[in-house]
Image (spheres, rainbow, N blue to C red):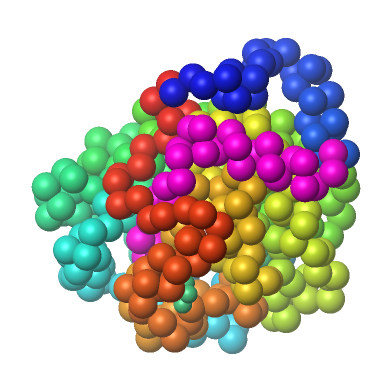
Amino acid sequence: VEAPAVAEARLFAPEDEAHCRRTIEEWWRMPLEDLVSRADRVCRTVYGDGVYLRGLLEFSNYCRMDCLYCGIRRSNRNVHRYRLDEEVILQVVRTAFARGFRTFVLQSGEDPAWPAGRLARLVERIKEQTRGEAAVTLSCGLMTREEYRLLREAGADRYLMRFETADPDLHLRLRGVALERRIEGLVYLRELGYEVGSGFMVGLPGETDETMVENLLLCRRLDLDMVGIGPFIPHPETPLADAPQIPLDRTIRAVAILRLLLPGANLPGTTAAGSLEPDGRERMLASGGNVLMPNITPVQHKKDYLLYPGKICLDEDGFHCVGCLTMRVATVGKRIDWEKGTSRQYLW
Ligand code: 5AD
Ligand code: FES
């Protein structure tokens, strides 16, 4: 798929970083409406009016990390901790597969009770159960290269791990770990042949416009297949409780630029955007986004996976959401696409 609009967007070689940075800076200053309509054109050229669905399963909220922004950080003693066992996970996947889902995203905190070996056996069983017709995406944080290799060999197709912010000082302050470690992890995933997803939060306290340019540039430098971004929403039970809420427009601008930077990438309309504004996900889909991730976690656990307050769909099961999303995508002239939805960026 190399239509003129795509060719135009791919005009700079990745190694020409100075040019790339200048272009991003220009886009960052463009009127939002113009930027959005351009991104929407490129998105429709590459993905048509299709929106891929991913079944998101939050299988454990235990986490050894203590990120300042996150509601399920280790220090938050108010969180009711849960972890689903293999049989429950396989049952959820079986039901969702029967309903048409062809991608499952297994997400958790960095949970020591789910070491790579155990995860690998689970991935094998999911691939078996779905006769290899479903893609398995993992989103379980930073591991060693060996662990990522084990999981890849077990059949994992994709891995999601946001770098959160490309500002090394801010990253260290918020996460207590060097940005370089995460980037290294993403490079390993790439070497092992995963479809690689990353991304960042928009509106973190201490972030500037230059940070945003660096965030976008890093996505391009990593040649990401998928990029998930969303507005930072302060959680009352974290040290960032009193940080200001930045308006959604900044996230909309960022997703539009990502579509121009990485025309073939899968870009979700994220739950955080939908939690900040009722039509936040639709706005992202009208600005370059082409993916939705309905939450298929068993309803009784959804309320315990609160990374930020005001999270939507806590009382709905994932299948109710599919009906709701079918209507919502129609409002921006799109439709649900039930295919596995491999990233064009990965295929090209
Ligand atoms: N607001 C918005 N997004 C958050 N995340 C974590 N905490 C918050 C918050 N307070 C995002 C991070 C993480 C993803 C799963 O959720 O980017 O990678
Ligand atoms: Fe979940 Fe609308 S998407 S209820």
Q: Is residue 21 above or below residue 92?
A: above
* Nearer the observer, 340 or 88: 340
* Quadrant the N terminus occupies: top left
Quarter of the image where ligand 1 sits = bottom right
Q: Is residue 149 above or below residue 17?
A: below
* Nearer the observer, 199 or 61: 199
**Circle count:** 0
Q: Is residue 191 visible?
A: no
Residue 233: x percent and y percent? 71, 69
Would you say 15 lies left or right of 45 here? right
Residue found 55% across the figure and 38% down from its top: 43
Residue 338: x percent and y percent? 30, 52
Image quadrant assignment for residue 35: top right
Residue found 74% across the figure and 72% down from its top: 234
> Is 239 inside the magenta-drawn segment?
no
Would you say 21 lies left or right of 317 here? right
Would you say 110 lies left or right of 148 here? right
> Is 51 inside the magenta-drawn segment?
yes
* Nearer the observer, 202 or 38: 38
Residue 166: x percent and y percent? 73, 41
Image quadrant assignment for residue 247: bottom right
Query: Magenta region: which residues?
Result: 30-58
* Nearer the observer, 219 or 12: 12
Residue 261: x percent and y percent? 65, 30
Residue found 41% across the figure and 65% down from its top: 326
Q: Is residue 343 visible?
A: yes
